[in-house]
Image: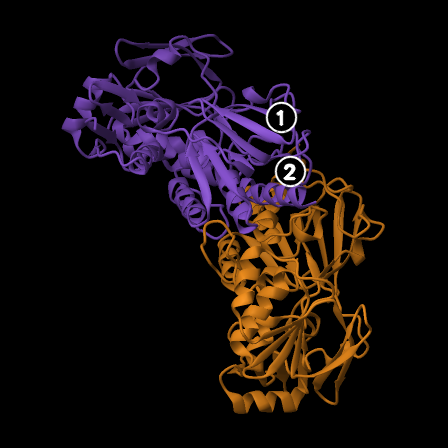
Chain colours: A orange, B purple
Amino acid sequence: MPRVTVYSTQNCPYCRMVKAFLDKYDVDYMAIDVGTDREQAKKMVEISGQYGVPVIVVDDEVIVGFDAQRLNELFGSAKPGDIYDVLIVGAGPGGLTAGVYCSRKMLKTVIISENIGGQALESWAIENYMGYRMVSGEDLMHRFEEQVREEHISLELDRVASIRKEGEIFLAETATGATYSAKTVILTQGKRPRKLGVEGEERYLGRGLSTCSTCDGPLFRDKVVAVVGGGNSALQTAIEMSKIAKTVYLIVRSTIKADEAYITRYREQKNIITYENHTISSLQGNAMLNGITIKDRDSGKETVIALDGVFAEVGWIPNTDFLEGFLMLNEMKEIVIDINCNTSFPGVFAAGDVTNIRTKQIITAAGEGAKAALEAYAYLTK
Amino acid sequence: MPRVTVYSTQNCPYCRMVKAFLDKYDVDYMAIDVGTDREQAKKMVEISGQYGVPVIVVDDEVIVGFDAQRLNELFGSAKPGDIYDVLIVGAGPGGLTAGVYCSRKMLKTVIISENIGGQALESWAIENYMGYRMVSGEDLMHRFEEQVREEHISLELDRVASIRKEGEIFLAETATGATYSAKTVILTQGKRPRKLGVEGEERYLGRGLSTCSTCDGPLFRDKVVAVVGGGNSALQTAIEMSKIAKTVYLIVRSTIKADEAYITRYREQKNIITYENHTISSLQGNAMLNGITIKDRDSGKETVIALDGVFAEVGWIPNTDFLEGFLMLNEMKEIVIDINCNTSFPGVFAAGDVTNIRTKQIITAAGEGAKAALEAYAYLTK
């Protein structure tokens, strides 16, 4: 067996998924919490050149992030497929709810997803999921996952790369080369973070630039950070980071557009410095990001800010690249559905943030997941 | 102050609402639990001629059930309305979720409903509300209600009898004669139990015939009862009543059509006697129901069953009578909505079981409530 070390922080959902993956395949590993152990945190940065978790070291190989494909190659075992009744793509609120509903209808179900919890994992605190006054995205998704684990559902950590139909059967090929067969498909693979659109962005990702503040936030204790964006998630990240970091710059392209509840709390924080009507014009640094230049969109005046980290909260793009030409997408590349979650392709259903429903909320994604499952059931039994 | 006595059982949501109503208007009352006190249970039946809770005695007047109109006449105070941003009709999962979302958007919101919790109150056990492995409808709706109570929302126990628009303002008149004004309306008033369609039905309601087994079930300990229906709620009621009553007859019009999970547990109960392909042809009794005659739909053969109670679980009818001609309903009298919960009337939104969405589930109603609220917000701010 190879020697495996996992560098992680406590609140990082991707860290937990790495561990869940290794546990599933009975891989022994040493777990190091770099949120509390500053010496080991330094060591992790040295080894990986990364200021972000998780980092997995397998013998001499350093794997950055929850790289499902590489982990599958090293430890996984692709299984030749049975024919499932339902193949669910994605395991966020929509996919997990669909899974529970399918299983309760005794449908043979597989969920394929790169992570468990989807975008919901990255919420610091959810105050409007009915049934809970306050819960972290991580905790809530953990409860969803537990409900799925109680059912007879296969849960595969992998990424669906293509879908096609042959005869009566849908075939889904994954990034790791596995093929799954199913009579119906439920698409719930959500969205991914939008890029800042600044040169050097790729280079600094994990080297000071982060798209998961719940994961990487604790690494920036008493440091100076910027949050980019002006919506609910940007404000929530700014509020949370203001408790961890020394100073938080909030860089907003136009004006803040968020719920009053967030705006009130944002105003109470004394260490948030806000630049509205500004964009990032460049990133500075060597091995690590150490500064940004921002630009006033009216005057063109530039300001240089020295800092240690940048959290991008500038929106999301639907994960539908592999569906182009297969079914109907709207101009925002979201899957077009009807009120009962049918897509334009019979036997294919969709739920959650990946669809053209305007409301992007956990409770709505879950409600749509239930719809999609019951529609798939009706489709299979008619 | 009048002398008020409330006869109730522990799990009965309508009993709790009576108490909440009286508490709201600072009315002193004596509460008697007839689920545990058999002597008082007898007395309640004598006074009211009723085998169902709640029963409220106000001086010499006996009020049967949570009669919001009569209670409002006796104790309430209709308020001349401010103009609300949003008027929500109904306080089930959809209405309560919409309320929380509206309030978080700082919209001035009123919820008008005859009860708090809607049909969800009447579920014995909910196993598929994500976030909870198992919860009673009563408990879950109590948590929803608590979230609403934390927000600045007016919650009025009343029934909307009509809606019209004058200029830019919607006017809703209630059963108690109050008028509320609002800029937008969210309709979430759900459905009501379908009748059995047997002669004498009205006469026996509360006298052996019940449409709320979670309320009245405990009154039938060690007795013989029938459950009418063949869907999930009929099976769930039969399973629960089999633990309370001596014998449970399950009368199914055609065949059982329920989730496998319920069917499995139903099969494990030894004291359920099932008649498929049978309907009730008559009800027998004097002051109280004491028997039913059922009829084989093929042979026409009739069977007489002596029993103490009948629980009707034969489906639901949308509460849309007052909306005929105001907006578009489908052939089942459900409100027609688009994927974002817009109705055919601009500024009027709808969510939950009252709409033409096929899936009638708590999580779906809640998800749609969030949609309706955010659409109302968008409508108001554009």
**Residue that numbered label 1 is attached to:** B166
Q: Looking at the image, which residue sits at the far left?
A: B39
Residue B341 marker: 2
- Percent coordinates x, y for residue B380 in the rendering: 65, 42
On the picture, is B72 further left or further right than A222?
Answer: left
- Residue depth check, mark 1 versus mark 2: number of the one nearer the observer: 1
Q: Nearer the viewer, residue A79 or A265?
A: A265
Can I make out residue A25 in this image?
no
Q: Relative to B306, is A51 above or below?
A: below
Q: Which of the 4 image quadrants contains residue B369?
A: top right
Q: Relative to B322, is A195 above or below?
A: below
Secondary structure category for the residue under label 1 = strand
Q: CA distance from mark 1 to mark 2?
A: 23 Å
Q: Relative to A349, is B330 above or below?
A: above
- Percent coordinates x, y for residue A105 in the rendering: 55, 41
Q: Nearer the viewer, residue A294 or B114?
A: A294
Q: Which circle's residue, 1 or 2, is located before the other in the chain? A: 1
Q: Nearer the viewer, residue A307 or A204?
A: A307
Q: Chain of mark 2?
A: B
Q: Amino acid at mark 2?
A: Cys
